[in-house]
Image (tube, rainbow, N blue to C red):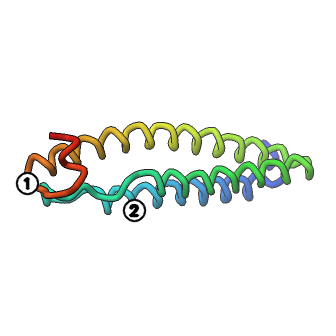
Amino acid sequence: MAERTRGGCAALALAGAELAALALIFLAWGGSYFSWDPQSIGDPVGPYVAKAGVVAVFAAVAAVVAAGLRAGAMVRSQVAVVVLSIAVMVGANAAGTSAERERRWQACHAGLAADWCADLR
């Protein structure tokens, strides 16, 4: 049988908690963004990307601390969370910005009377 690595269970638990936090952040954005109202544009994705950045920073700090303690499993899991967080942030920012632009255009053409609609018509 394989022996457990030092901190392997803790690494898995921490990475799972951080990934759950990322999922909750973007589920919160999705819940505020999607609406049946044609004039609703939802929340911008920027604040949610910043919250995901906090998760990435937390994971990076945990990786540095784990490297100092020579906990290899923790370092690897936290580096994976940092890389995944950055990938999610880049993808969500691109997709969110594009979707927001499209929703603004649709809302203006549905009759929304906002100052920024003059630029989109």
Q: Please state, as top left, top right, bottom left or bottom right, where the N terminus lies in the image.
A: top right
Q: Is residue 114 above or below residue 93?
A: below
The reply to whether residue 22 is visible in this rendering is yes
Residue in the picture at 69% in, 52% down:
57
CA neighbours of label 1 inside 10 A, class few (<14), some (14 to 19), many (20+): few
Residue in the picture at 51% in, 42% down:
88
Q: Is residue 62 left or right of residue 32?
A: right
Foreground pick, 114 / 25 = 114
Q: Position of residue 40 (x, y in %)?
A: 20, 58
Q: Position of residue 80 (x, y in %)?
A: 66, 40
Q: Which residue is mark 2?
A: 28
- SS class of the residue under badge 1? loop
Q: Is residue 86 above or below residue 40?
A: above
Which amino acid does the dot numbered 1 rest on?
A: Gly
Which amino acid does the dot numbered 2 rest on?
A: Ala
Q: Which residue is mark 1?
A: 111
